[in-house]
Image: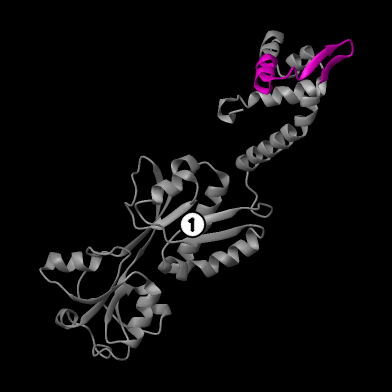
Amino acid sequence: MRLEKVDLNLFVLFDAIYREGSVTKVAQRLNLTQPAVSNALSRLRQTFDDPLFVRTPSGMVPTPVAESVIGDVRKALTLLGKSVGAAASFDPKTAEKQFCIGMNDLAQTLLLAPLRKLLRDQAPNSSLHTYYVDRQTAADDLKSGNLDVVLDSPGLFNAREMGSKNLAQLPYVVAMGDQCSLNSKKVSLEDYLSAEHLHVSSRRKGRGQVDIALHGLGYKRKIKMRVQGYLVAERLTESTDLVWTVPEILAQQANLKTAALPFEVEPLGWSLFWHKSAADDPANQWLRSVVSDIVSAAIS
């Protein structure tokens, strides 16, 4: 039997005939005509290659094949019913769900502790998985349901497929450790350009927002080290002479000295993305709401 070729509504009718023992009663119960029920029963018999029910003076009696599958059919219908009910409403207090969020280590550092507390208090039976997602595959992960939401830069996805909400703008500052010669003074543009820099990017190459801003002014900084993770960058800045241009909210939590940037840079934007097929899913709506609240609290 190839399940994709089977009308799953037939199993509802199968269970109804088993319960009622009468085509007439099933037609009345399911608001169908008797010929429609008889036709569906014929299709079921072809699917199982068995009569399934035999007419007797006392009604339709199940065959041994029908007896052997009724338990599995009812379990399947019950599971489907629970899934439909769970999709129609979501109660975080009782739900047992694994939420999956795509985010980088900056977002993980700032948001996971308060998210853990919120889940413990509001959704104690649910769990949370987070990991950095490649931007080229993130759309497929959202579409397939491998991810519930993604937290990343604005304009990441095609708006026709994704829903989105802008959550925050994270301004940059200059961060440095004790070994940096700039750590005790106001940083001028000349100071900034003469320093050696650390750059964080998930990509192997390409300019970040800081470099784009400098390019617009006709300048270029000296990037001496490029890494993928914010936490690695924090440790490197703390223990070397490198200068790191970082969102202020992270620098405030690190053991680093900071100074204002001597030029204008567009802040790092955070947006929340979800696939439009999940837009009306109550569980996804709840997750989007709590992530929005956590971000607002973190940057306030």
Task: Tell which of 67 and 171 is nearer to you.
Answer: 67
- Give how far across and how far down residue 30 sits, in percent: 71, 19
205 relative to 43 in the view: left or right: left
- Give how far across and how far down residue 128 sits, in percent: 56, 60
Q: Quadrant of the N terminus?
A: top right
22 relative to 244 in the view: left or right: right
Q: Is residue 287 above or below residue 206?
A: above
The residue sitting at the right extreme is 58
Q: Quadrant of residue 38?
A: top right
Residue 253 seen in the figure: yes
231 relative to 227 in the view: left or right: right
- Residue positioned 72% across, 32% down in the render: 73
Residue 47 sits inside the magenta stretch? yes
Residue 46 sits inside the magenta stretch? yes
- Residue positioned 18% across, 82% down in the render: 188
- Residue positioned 16% across, 69% down in the render: 214
Q: Is residue 139 above or below residue 219?
A: above
Boundaries of the magenta span: 40-62
The residue sitting at the front extreme is 49
- Give how far across and how far down residue 102 sits, in percent: 45, 57
Residue 300 seen in the figure: no
- Give how far across and how far down residue 281 sits, in percent: 54, 43
Residue topped by disc 1 = 101
